[in-house]
Amino acid sequence: MTSITHTISEIQKLTHQAIADGRPIVLIPTMGALHEGHLSLVDTAYSLELDNPFVVMSIFVNPLQFAAGEDLDSYPRTLDADAAKLAAHNHQVHAIFAPSPAEMYPLGPRTTITPGAAALLFEGATRPTHFAGVLTVVNKLFQITQCQHAIFGEKDFQQLALIRQMVADFNLPVHVHGSPLMRDHDGVALSSRNAYLSDTERVEARRISVALHQAAMFHVKHDIIAAAANAMAGMDIDYIDVVAPDFSEPTAGNELYGDARLITAVKVGNIRLLDNMAVNVEKPNA
């Protein structure tokens, strides 16, 4: 049975007991409105084959990562439905941590994490305060739960890279694991925001994954980007680029070749959709 907790003291009572029992803590941070992509994070936790893990899922719509005018107030909050989905899943989540903003920030966000330069690119260019809010709440969740492992979806690929940077830079004793991006039956990357799409917009959204699949057949960086852009011609594209898995910047004499990630953000109607796909980058023929 899954315990539902709302306070830091409640969740720490459970995690402290698990640690005393020698059980590794696995944290799955989410904002709720769970779908199959979130449930796959639970499956990833169990794929680590840890000895009797204690799995915690946080469900918290973090106000720090929303700027003025974004969808903080309208973001779906469906705790009862989320708990039911977890209860029916074949892998157990032992505890849900669903705090209020007042529980997480009782005196306001006095101390925050300032991310590095990679946080100003792509998602950060559009949402300049977003990743500071993400890293702050993730670091706080790490401290609260004392987790040894944390699972994040690869759909938010830049977020995953920045969390890994934070863990490395602060020497946090947490192993960060990426869970593969999940797609719906029509190829659209699973996202809680997909529920906002109209039927017509849903058809338009399918073009994104089709474009990425077509682009992934190319191997020169410029060709990959051009193929994706051409396949999404006429769509409201925020960005398309090919990046290193760790979001490190290529330098002269150290260009980006080999494993890479094609990333994009596209606005469909009023909904901004993220997607990405693994690609292999080769040197162009001379």
Image (cartoon, rainbow, N blue to C red):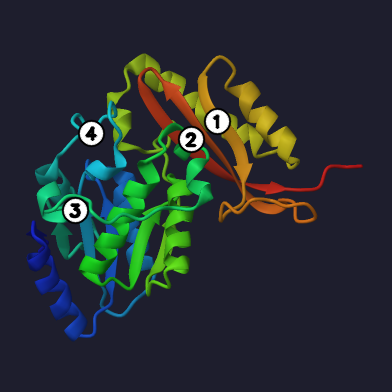
The N terminus: image quadrant? bottom left
Which element is circle 4 on?
loop
Picture coordinates of residue 183, whole percent (x, y): 42, 40
Camera-side residue: 102 or 277? 102
The reply to whether discs 2 and 4 touch (Cβ–Cβ < 8 Å) is no
Q: Residue at x 38, y 22 (%)?
A: 202
The residues bearing labels 2 and 1 have C-alpha atoms spaced at a distance of 10 Å
Q: Which residue is drawn at 20% across and 48% down?
A: 60
Whichever of callouts 2 and 4 sits on the residue coming sooner in the sequence is 4
The residues bearing labels 3 and 1 have C-alpha atoms spaced at a distance of 34 Å
Check disc 1 and report the residue beneath it. 239
Q: In this view, does 169 lie above or below 218?
A: below
Whichever of callouts 1 and 4 sits on the residue coming sooner in the sequence is 4
Which element is circle 1 on?
strand
Mark yes or no: residue 223 visible: yes
Which element is circle 2 on?
helix
Mark yes or no: residue 34 visible: no
Check disc 2 and report the residue beneath it. 125
| In the image: residue 281, left or right of residue 248 | right
2 or 4: mark nearer the eye: 2
The residues bearing labels 4 and 3 have C-alpha atoms spaced at a distance of 24 Å
Check disc 3 and report the residue beneath it. 86
2 or 3: mark nearer the eye: 2
